[in-house]
Amino acid sequence: MDPLESKKTYQDYVDKKSPNSKILKNCFNAFWVGGLICTIGQVIFNICKERGFDTQTCGTIVSILLIGISAFLTGINLFNKIGKFAGAGSLIPITGFANSIVSPAMEYKSEGYVMGVGGKMFTVAGPVLVFGISTSILVGIIFLIFNTQNITLV
């Protein structure tokens, strides 16, 4: 058999067996799911504004709630299904960060919550993110202590 003919036969076989990419459908799903996540964040923001919080506090509350919802959905294995459907639409917003921390840790829950989930969260799921969150909590507590005693830090 001629090498060119065998190459063409193989390419025809690969083209026949390979799934067709549904790029327009995938982009549309990413767009509307990402937009829905942002809309949910904006609704939470507006509710906080109506309750009298300033803009910075509203943004913080939105971030915390979206991260918490994403972590919860990852824990019950629903966020992964959303991620397969929406692709980058669910992973690009802040919800993707929570998923990147919780998802690897959940794989080790059979080893226990302290040594399995807690331990692997620090080794597998991005120590930079976990360090950043932990440090921000610590700095917030220190700021709160000094702020209630009217001591100027800066």
Image: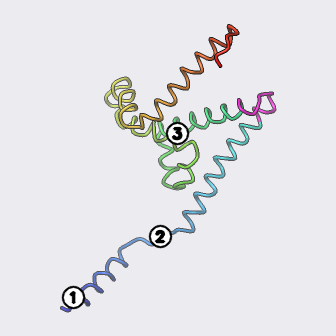
Mark before the other along the chain sequence, 2 or 1: 1
Q: Secondary structure at mark 3?
A: helix
Q: Residues within 10 Å of mark 2 (few under 14, many from 20)?
A: few
Q: Which residue is mark 1?
A: 3
The N terminus: image quadrant: bottom left
Q: Which residue is mark 2?
A: 21
Q: CA distance from mark 3 to mark 1?
A: 52 Å
Which kind of residue does numbered mark 3 sit on? Leu
Give how far across and how far down residue 144 sits, in percent: 64, 15
Relative to 58, is 16 above or below? below
**Picture quadrant where residue 136 is located:** top right
**Picture quadrant where residue 101 is located:** top left
The C terminus: image quadrant: top right
Which kind of residue does numbered mark 2 sit on? Ser
Q: For residue 140, which numbered disc appears in the image?
A: none
Q: Residues within 10 Å of mark 1 (few under 14, many from 20)?
A: few
For the point 61% across and 52% down, the residue is 34
Give how far across and how far down residue 115 sits, in percent: 33, 25
Q: CA distance from mark 2 to mark 1?
A: 29 Å
Q: For residue 73, which numbered disc appears in the image?
A: 3
State whether the magenta stretch is mostly helix, strand or loop: helix
Q: Residues within 10 Å of mark 3 (few under 14, many from 20)?
A: some
Which kind of residue does numbered mark 1 sit on? Pro
Give how far across and how far down residue 27 sits, in percent: 57, 63
Q: Are marks 2 and 1 in contact (CB under 8 Å)?
A: no
Instruction: Magenta stretch: give its range.
Output: 47-57
Mark before the other along the chain sequence, 3 or 1: 1
Give how far across and how far down residue 35 sits, in percent: 66, 52
